Image (cartoon, rainbow, N blue to C red):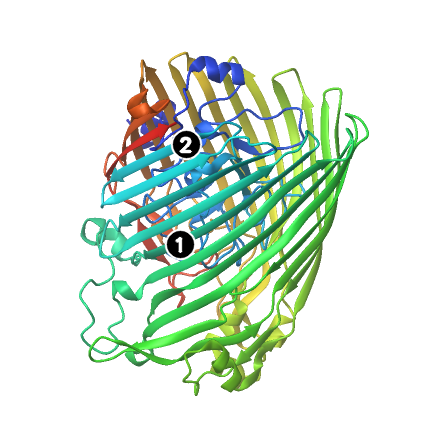
Amino acid sequence: MKKSSIVLSLVATATLMANPISIESITVNEVVVEGDSLFMGDYNLSKADNSEHFTSKSIATLSSHANMNPYTVIAFSPSVNFTPADTVGSNEPSFHDPIRIRGKSQSGPGGVYMINGMPLSSNPGGGKHMLDMENTASIDLLKGYLPVEKNLGFSSLIGKVDLNVLKPKKEAGAILSQSFGSDNFKRTFLRFDTGTIGDFSAFGSFSTLSNEKYKGEGDLERVNGMVGLSYKPNERFEANLYAIRNSDEHHNYGSLSYEEIQDLDTYFDKDYKTTEPTSANDVDYYDFNKQDFLTTNIFADIRYDLTAEDTFTFKPYYKQDKGEIFFSKFNSTPAKQGVINWKMDHDLYGVVAAYEHRFSEAIKAKAGYWHHRQLPPGPPTDRRLYGVDAEGELFFKKYASLADVEHHVLQAPFVEVSGEVDNFIYSAGLQYQDFKLSSIDNYLTDSNTSLDYDTAIATSTYDSWGSVEAKTFKTWLPSFYAAYKLDEVSTVYLDYSRTYGFDVNLYPTYTSNYATFKSKGITLQQLWNDLELETSDNIDLGYKTTIGAVTLHPSLFVSFVHNKQANIYDSDLDVNYPANLGDAFGYGAEFSAYGVVTEDLEFMMGLSYNRYSFDQDFATSATTTSDIKGNQLPDAPKFMATGALSYYLDNWTFTPSVRYSSSRYGDVENTQKVDGYTVVDMDISYKLKNFLGSKNTLFRLTVTNLTDEKYISTITTPDNVLAASTTSSTYQTGAPRMVFFSVNMKY
């Protein structure tokens, strides 16, 4: 049988990925009555919205045993390529989450996920995964179409993943979950709900997670606490306030070169050195490659129905993040090697407010305003360079980058008109965005010896060559959705929206090549003046229908990307630098199906085809031009498939799952080809009532990567990296076979 036939057979029979799932009683009758599949929720055909909705049941089933990363859930959606370094899903190899949607990667210091419609995530730093999945009621995945009130954050280029918090429950209760597994994995989760007390209800949760790396030395330690308070004096007013405190410490995994991944049998277990350094410049040591962050997150969701036709919503949010990253710095000469200590102490805060008036079912009007302030890094402002002495100890050399910055500021009024006329559903929105990049006051670092940032700024020399003024982009962001209900269960739709993003690579590129730029008389401000905001115009055409208890959803999509950042050679200036000069084109097709086959059997599957490439070649030197036009961008598989199946037998549930990715490339010239892979997981659960006084208890056994496939998970590379460039692509191996066991009790 051909490999493609095997993959399609696996998808057709497929099944679901590991995990502590909901301890709620799950029955086929319950699924049919609620119109709610175990794997995904039904689309709301009477609402102008094209998001994919993952219910609490699908979260409980699809989320990994770590129950902390929403991307493990949405990875079963077509065109979502999530490739973490390990099964926990937190140990990212770079400073961004390893996720692509429809071939696109996130840009700049913008995060992909939101919480209750608020853009609370950012990169780099901590707090990427602050919300435990047990505290998540549902997840909305928005790929191409973004309504104006969700088109938020420092970047929306690839879409958004919106997490909806599980509010305090009306009845008092508790949930206790304990998990164990391979590589000394341990996780404990506890949540208490007070139930309704007068007009108030509240919950508190606490979780701890620890896990050793599956290769090399190092581990992960995560502690998370959350409280929620709900106030509802009547049906017209409701206010929910939440606070999260998250601590995350972990060692990173080492990467492989393209030559090394040609022989995974030999290099699969290669990682950072575990023996302590014994000589100068011996920087490739595991304890020189780690992260440590403490993040605080406070946000509120307030809704007030002024009348039966008028609603006001107010969503303020705040996130404070402090920590550091250590990583090895290699250079062609040992004297320039070292260890970078990237310090971060930054915050973001803002508010999303909206007023909606419902004239009729045919016309609903909304007007709103979004204000967001976000402090760098992004770009880096506080990086210290350390050397390794003859005894293997770190010593401070100088600042690798030192700058004083202000907040990036984004603000946007928006309007939207939507409604339903007979079988026609529509929504039209417009956002006018004012996007201000912070000014940068750069300082010379060669003579600075102070480890205190404020002292270093006060005693260093201001550098006019590497400093820039604030820069503002003003952009219109339209969106449009139109659907026609062919009958009660079938809809055809067309939608359009413009998304945006910005990479902040110019400043670190300039400071890293400071002598070259200065020798040619080029200031950073000269290059800064030409920066443009990257935008993507996205169009989807799709069809949704339900046959019996099975939902089918085929769709086509296309994206026109403008001002995409690329590292180009400027013949007038005789230098290479990142510039927003690229145009890219993406298109593809998706198909998803999920639902109930028999009263004992449920399934889901997803298929996708993606093409994403630059529309032009770029000069790479005074005499050479790249040959990349039309080539698939790096780390973007053309074909992906997922499948899952749950079979119920008395109190037992058997859930196998499969994920397939076709081959990818590690460079835009498409010379570094990476083989495709198929990963199969198996999950077995047993449900028991009245165990140790609980209402329901779920025992679960999970085996991930059942066949122990050796494959490449993440490729760390810029989208326009050339095979012969100095910024070489690096490669992460995927986790081998692992076994996990959990007990989940509800009281």
Whichever of callouts 1 and 2 sits on the residue coming sooner in the sequence is 2
Residue found at the far front of this picture = 198
Q: From where the camera sits, is residue 196 visible?
A: yes
Residue 136: give x, y in percent of width and height.
48, 37
In percent of width and height, residue 322 lies at: 46, 62
Q: Is residue 725 left or right of residue 509?
A: left
Q: Nearer the viewer, residue 687 or 17?
A: 687
Amino acid of disc 1: Ser
Q: Which residue is mark 2?
A: 174
Q: Tell me the distance, in whole angstroms, between the alpha carbons under discs 1 and 2.
A: 23 Å
Q: Give residue 130's position: percent from left, percent from top.
A: 46, 48
Position of 458 with respect to 178 (left or right) is right
Q: In the picture shown, does residue 628 fall above or below 21?
A: below
Q: Secondary structure at mark 2?
A: strand
- In this rendering, the answer to whether 313 lies above or below 276 is above
Tag 1 residue: 247
Point 48% across, 17% down: residue: 31
Report crowding for label 2: few under 14, some 14 to 19, many 20 or more residues within 10 A (C-alpha): some
Tell me where residue 532 appears, x and y as whole percent: 64, 62
Q: Quadrant of residue 694?
A: top left
> 438 and 185: which one is in front?
185
Front residue of 190/285: it is: 190
Is label 1 in a helix, a strand or a loop?
Answer: strand
Front one among 416 and 184: 184
Amino acid type of the residue tagged 2 in the rendering? Ala
> Quarter of the image containing the N terminus?
top left
Quarter of the C terminus within the rendering: top left
